[in-house]
Each structure stands twice: as structure tokens, then as C-alpha cells.
Image: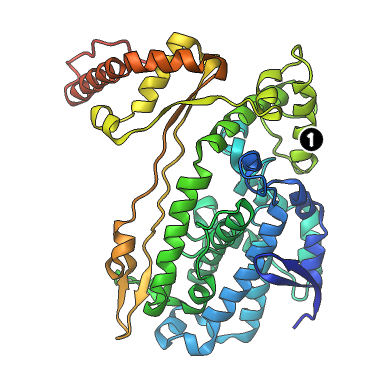
Amino acid sequence: MTKLFHEIRDPIHVFIHLNWYEKMVLDSRPFQRLRNITQLALTYLLYPGATHKRFEHSLGVMELAGRVFEVITKPANVTDEVRELLPDLGNPDALSYWKQVLRMAALCHDVGHLPFSHAAEDELLPKGWSHERLSRLLIESDEMRTIWKSMVPPLEPEHIVKLAVGARKAKDLRFSKWEAILSEIIVGDAFGVDRIDYLLRDSHHTGVGYGKFDHYRLVDELRILPSFDGSTEPALGINGGGIYSAEALALARYFMFSQVYYHSIRLIYDHHLKDFLSVWLSRDSLLSEGTFPTDVEGHLRITDDEVNAAMRLAASAPNLRGHRPASCIMRHSHFKVLYEKNPQDAKVHSDPGAAIANAAEIEFGTEAIRYSKPRVKNVAPDFPVRGRDGRIQPAISASETLSKLQPTSQEYVFVDPQLRAKAKSWLNNNQDTILAKAQREEQEDEKHEADPKIRPTHPAEP
């Protein structure tokens, strides 16, 4: 067993321990870059304490991954049925190897993040690219391969990639049942330690209590269980005694999304940041045309620091490109909420915010309006639960709380603050008419889809 070499104090996990090889990864350029990648983008403009970085989050994910591995591979926690499905559980050498792969994968799972993390990923990476693909590129880079080869035993980069990004983001790779379980420890929907750490850490640094839950009990009750659907695929599940901790995890995620991640001010700052980055990326000759670079050196060169410096400069003079979004951020003069989704409006039109945003853009111009409808998250994924009698059932059946917990949904229309009063008056006078018109057009579209011979009477979108 490699001796411990380094320990780091952490506000969430108290101490995080690293061996010699893990310290080598910590000192590498891809990982050190994470010291300058903010975990929650510009959320610190709303919650001043939210200045924590991907660096400490990744260390926390490694710490939790190691704890989960120890629990689920403990001989007393493994049934004969599961041991037959996963032979590696009975091989001490294999367990030692895969524990190190898991910890390295957890450490490297976020090295591909762009400046300010998720804020501009979808819009400002070339088609087909994501932060997971960039993480894979870095894990397989020459710099990191040197570390993997130096280890005893050497680690296979492909194994680290599989566990770091998961089957959904590495569809070209074949996962064994064992590899699928281990990747679920890091990026799984139900008990992924990436999720556990960011909820605890984000809650701590924003100063809200929504993200806290009994993760100690949760980890202690995790098990590899046969699937509840009768298949031979094992899955990461939980003993019945831990179901309340699992409910608390799902509720923490629900409240953090609705109260923090989807807060209106956080969302509009993401818009201003994307507006600035689209200008900055298109004018910088060192970067790809209009998108973030996808080569190793180009990626390592850009962090929050470079973007902040460019924004500060652009905000200082009206004649500089990107001045408007940069000044919105640097001077805290963000666009204001014009419309927030109301359940009653959704009964009139399925997408009321989009209808109002379209009408507002016609009335006030596209530069004065921003529309945000963040993705709906499934906050209560299903997983196997083993009851006291030994029977396995789906969590949705075992927990009334999880069965009723629905994904959170938000929708906002924002307006230039100089036009807010005028826009509010306009919306008060025209909202019912806008939604009624949108409803008629929606009904005409539905009829057209049902019978193509019926032509919609409103102009089609380009």
C-alpha cells in the first residue's frame, strides 16, 4: 500500500489525504489550473462567500469516492450473489488497483471545465465538445500519461477516463459491469459523490442551509445490489435504513436548484458573461474563432483570471468591444426580471416565458431582452433499496417522498434596467393578449402536425 504523503485541511471533510502519486496529479498543470476556475461562476455577486473553486471540490470528490469504495467492497457488505456478478470483489490486487483508478478519476473528473465552469459551455464550445470530453483529452495527454505510467502498478488512462466521465459521456468505450458501478460512484445520478460534494460545499460557501444532509449515514448504507427489475446488472443502491438520508440528498438537490442554482440574478449574470465571452473569443487571435480552444495548451492557458482581466478592461471604456455586458457584471448593473413563470400562465400556453420574450424583443429590441429557461433536473432518480427482509425494490416504491418529488422548473424574461418601468407597464397592458395569441398559434401548430393539410395561419419561425 502506498504510504500517505500529504494531507489538506478542508471545511467540508476536515482532512483530505493524498498518497505520493495523487500529490503528483495535484501538482500537475491541468489540476493546478482548477485553482482559478470558480465552482459557481458569478454566483459570488449574489452570495459573496461563493468564491470556492473546482480545485477543492475535486479533492472532496476524491475523498468521498475513497470512502464509498471502502464501504461497498467491505466483505461483510457484499453478498454471494453480487460477488458472482463482480469477480473483482474477491481479488485483493484488483481492488487495490481499482481503488487507485477511482481516486485518480475523481481527482481529474473536472479538469476539462471552462472558465466559470458551466456558465458558457453549451454555447461557446465547438459542436460535439463538452467539459467531459476536454477532461478526457487531458487525462490522456502526454503530461498525465507520464504520471499514470510511473505508478506501481501503472494505471491505464482509459480506465481513468471511464470512471471520470461515465458511460453517457464516453459512448465509444465499452464498460464492464464493474466499471459501470465504479463510474456511478463518481458521476451517478443517485449517489454520485460529485453531486454529494458540490451540494455540501456550495451550501457551505453560499451560506444557505438547503444543501446539508447526513452524508455520513448515506455513505455507510450504500451497497452494490442486484437490480430490482430482474436483470443481471448490479447497481449502486442502499439499505432501507439509509432511505431517509437518500431522501434528504434528493431534497437538498431540489432546494439548491430552486433557491441557488436557478436564482434569477445568478441566471442573468450567466447571460451577461456569455455575451461578453462571445465577443472576447471572436476578437482574440490566440483563441479559436468564436469558441473556446479544444487543444491541451489552449485549454490550459485560459482561466477565470484572464476573463476577469478582459472584462475589467472592457468595462472601463464605452468604445471597447464587449463594454455593455462587461459593465453589467463589473458595475452590478444587471438586467432586471420583467417576467417570472406563473403556473396560471402555463395553463394558457405551454411556454409563456418564450411567448413574452418574443413579444418583448419585437417591442424593445433583442439587445434589451434576455430569456432564461434552465434545464429541468431530475432530482429524484430511481435506485435499488434493500429492505429489512432482504427484498429489493425501487426507491420510488420504497419512498413516498421520492415518488412525489418533481423536477424543478424556472422561466424568466429579463429587461435592460433603463427600460424596466416602461416594459413593466407594457407587459401589464399586453400580457393576456400575448399569451392568448400564443395559445391560438400553438393550437394551430398542433392541428397542422395532426393533419399536414391544415396550414398554420401565423408565420413560421425561420
Q: Observer-nearest residue: 7 or 285?
A: 7
* Residue at figure coordinates x 33%, y 13% from the top left: 429
Could you tell me if residue 302 is visible in this image?
no
Q: Observer-nearest residue: 290 or 360?
A: 360
Q: Is residue 438 left or right of residue 117?
A: left
Q: Looking at this view, name the residue that lies furthest to the bottom.
A: 76
Could you tell me if residue 246 is visible in this image?
yes
Q: Observer-nearest residue: 345 or 293?
A: 345
* Residue at figure coordinates x 44%, y 83% from the top left: 84
* Residue at figure coordinates x 18%, y 22% from the top left: 447
Position above or below: 447 against 91: above
Q: Is residue 349 left or right of residue 287?
A: left
Quadrant in which the C terminus is drawn = top left
Position above or below: 310 against 191: above
Within-10-Å neighbours for mark 1: few <14, some 14–19, many 20+: few
Indicate the colouring scheme: rainbow
Instruction: Please state which amino acid type lies under the numbered disc 1.
Output: Glu
Measuring from the top left, give residue 91's x and y in whole percent.
Answer: 59, 85
Measuring from the top left, give residue 392's x and y in whole percent.
Answer: 32, 77
Dot 1: element: helix
Measuring from the top left, give residue 268's x and y in whole percent.
Answer: 55, 31
Q: Is residue 243 left or right of residue 51?
A: left
Position above or below: 425 against 256: above
Snapshot quadrant of residue 99: bottom right
Quadrant in which the N terminus is drawn = bottom right
Q: How many marks?
A: 1
Snapshot quadrant of residue 450: top left
In this figure, which residue is indicated by the disc labeled 1?
Answer: 306
* Residue at figure coordinates x 43%, y 53% from the top left: 254
Measuring from the top left, give residue 163's x and y in whole percent.
Answer: 59, 62
Q: Is residue 161 left or right of residue 22?
A: left
